[in-house]
Image (cartoon, helix red, strand yellow):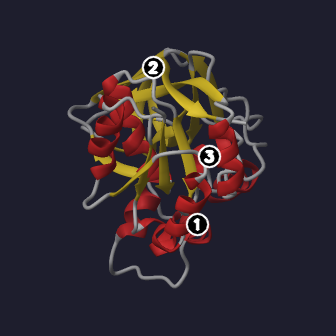
Amino acid sequence: MTKPIHLIVNPAAGGGRAKRRREQAISALGALGPLEVRESAAARDETRLAIEAAESNARALVVLGGDGSVSHAARGLIASKSQVPLAIFAAGTGNDFAKSLGIPAHDYAAMAQLIRASRVRTIDAGEIDGVPFVNAAGLGFDVAVLRRMQDPRAGSWLQGTPRYVITAVQSLLGYPGFDAAVHALGNGARQRWLTIVFANGRWFGGAFQIAPHAQLDNGVLETVAIADASPVGRAALFARALRGAHLSRPEVKTMSSAAVTLVCPDAPHFEVDGELHHARSGTVVVRCLPGALRAIAG
């Protein structure tokens, strides 16, 4: 008997976009054989549903949602050490991981054909302070932007990538920077940073090619550490990062490494695939998880 495909739908993703595209996803997958559809009923519910798919040895796990939904589902597969491949039916805002994979994630029929053909790629994941991620994690400016976006007092008719970019521009001058020592980067001395990103994938924030040379299957993460700069310097870095041209700036330091340790004066906040977390202490360990995940890719 053909094993069923498991479809996880996050109805809230993309401001309800996933809910509206649910039947389209089911139709695309229907020709592939048995299909089990689950809806996430609470925040981070995708992890539990992914573990269930792994335990049943599903043919594939398809996530209809955004980066957060995909990240939580991936954590379940990683925790299970599962061979079940992850497929993305994009319905979120930034969809950075899908861009980094280079898949037609908005074309559900095309994604279904990749599942049919078993186009599976083994890729790495990352982990920061014990929290797995698939695309990128970061500290500093991106955390400030996400916190501002989540402030209910901020309000905006914009959503997704346009809102992130506008909020980032609004935050650019007022953000004070943060202090940290990045061991294995230069001499490891503490200095003030604008942002530090640990990238498994190339794309970040919906529009930024933060790590143009990142590869999903090379056993390392790309550390992109951007030192604090003047207002004019910040604006220039911001604009160049849109096209991945910021790496040549003197404020930017990069490193490919399997593990990095940051030492901060206090336990910092960080973001993982667009989700905010608070570190357990001022010492934060980031590491690559080689070959941790199987994904449907073109």
- Label ID, residue 98: 3
| Tags 1 and 2 touching, CB below 8 Å | no
For mark 1, what is the residue? 24
The secondary structure type at the circle numbered 1 is helix
Q: Nearer the viewer, residue 114 or 239?
A: 114
Instruction: Between label 1 and label 2, give the one nearer the viewer.
Output: 1
Q: Residue at x 45, y 71 (%)?
A: 19
- Label ID, residue 289: 2
Q: State the quadrant of the C terminus.
A: top right
Q: CA distance from mark 1 to mark 2?
A: 34 Å
Q: Is residue 125 left or right of residue 29?
A: left
Residue 173: % across, % down:
54, 64
Q: Residue at x 45, y 19 (%)?
A: 289
| Tags 3 and 1 touching, CB below 8 Å | no
Residue 196: % across, % down:
51, 38
When asked about the image quadrant of residue 247, the answer is top right
Q: State the quadrant of the N terminus.
A: top left
Q: Is residue 40 left or right of residue 114?
A: left
When asked about the image quadrant of residue 180, the answer is top left
Most extreme residue toward the bottom is: 157
Q: Amino acid at mark 2?
A: Leu
Of callouts 1 and 2, the N-terminal one: 1
Residue 116: % across, % down:
65, 38
As drawn, 185 above or below 46: above
Of callouts 3 and 2, the N-terminal one: 3
As drawn, 30 above or below 127: below
Q: CA distance from mark 3 to mark 1?
A: 18 Å
Q: Amino acid at mark 1?
A: Gln
